Image (cartoon, rainbow, N blue to C red):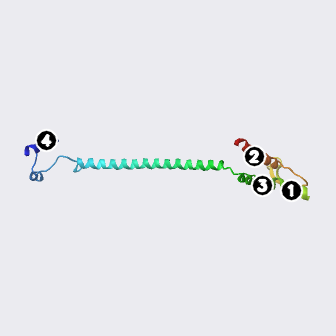
């Protein structure tokens, strides 16, 4: 029996069998590193730390993948919502939008032009001008001028506003086709 045990232990690398009593009384000096920590303990601590770091790193990568997946889902949902709003085909909705736009154009642009013509109300325009200073001693000053006009008055603001509205309306209809 002892020969079989000796053979098995020699294949593992243990050459000598020490009795328990001898092992307790003898001083063991082999296998100690770094202040008395055995090599096995250092290996276990190192592998535990490395395993923990790898686990945390893996969880971080999984969290980033999940975040990217959720971002893609949110982007797909947003694109579907935008596309469904663009392709919303309801004649009532289109007519409501047109009525709101035409009412705004009428009361912002047309009504202020029609009131002075129909009711004989004066139109007062205000603009800024620069006055000349005195030689080089006084800079030019900005002053406000008010002038009263009768009848239909078309200002540069009106022409710019109408051209912007017409451009947006016809530009939008050209893009759809």
For discs 1 and 4, the disc positioned in front in the rendered view: 4
Q: Secondary structure at mark 4?
A: helix
For discs 1 and 3, the disc positioned in front in the rendered view: 3
Query: In the rendered image, is residue 145 in sight?
Result: no
Q: Secondary structure at mark 1?
A: strand
* Badge 1 or badge 2: first in the primary sequence: 1
For discs 4 and 3, the disc positioned in front in the rendered view: 3
Dot 4, crowdedness within 10 Å: few (<14), some or many (≥20)?
A: few
Front-lying residue, 17 or 176: 176
Dot 2, crowdedness within 10 Å: few (<14), some or many (≥20)?
A: few
Residue 124, numbered label: 1
Question: Whole-Å distance between the Cαs marked 1 and 3?
Answer: 22 Å
Q: Is residue 149 left or right of residue 104?
A: right
Query: In the rendered image, is residue 69 in sight?
Result: yes
Q: Is residue 135 left or right of residue 67?
A: right
State yes or no: discs 2 and 3 in contact (Cβ < 8 Å): no
Residue 12, numbered label: none
Residue drawn at point x = 81 percent, y = 56 percent: 107
Front-lying residue, 17 or 72: 72
Residue topped by disc 2: 169
Residue 10, numbered label: 4
Q: Secondary structure at mark 2?
A: helix
* Badge 4 or badge 2: first in the primary sequence: 4
Residue drawn at point x = 77 percent, y = 48 percent: 165
Dot 1, crowdedness within 10 Å: few (<14), some or many (≥20)?
A: few
Rendered location of residue 117, percent (x, y): 90, 55
The quadrant in which residue 163 appears is top right
The quadrant in which residue 115 appears is bottom right
């Amino acid at each position: 029996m002892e020969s079989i045990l000796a053979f098995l232990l020699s294949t593992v690398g243990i050459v000598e069998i020490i009795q328990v009593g001898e092992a307790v009384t003898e001083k063991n000096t082999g296998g100690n590193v770094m202040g008395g920590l055995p090599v096995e303990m250092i290996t276990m601590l190192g592998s535990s730390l490395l395993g923990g770091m790898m686990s945390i790193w893996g969880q971080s990568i999984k969290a980033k993948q999940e975040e990217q997946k959720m971002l893609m889902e949110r982007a797909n949902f947003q694109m579907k919502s935008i596309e469904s709003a663009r392709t919303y085909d309801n004649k009532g909705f289109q007519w409501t939008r047109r009525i709101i736009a035409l009412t705004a154009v009428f009361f912002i642009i047309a009504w202020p032009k029609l009131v002075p013509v129909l009711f004989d109300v004066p139109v007062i325009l205000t603009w800024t001008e620069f006055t000349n200073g005195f030689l080089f001693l006084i800079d030019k000053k900005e002053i406000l001028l008010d002038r009263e006009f009768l009848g239909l008055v078309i200002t540069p603001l009106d022409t710019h506003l109408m051209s912007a509205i017409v451009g947006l309306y016809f530009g939008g209809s050209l893009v759809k086709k």
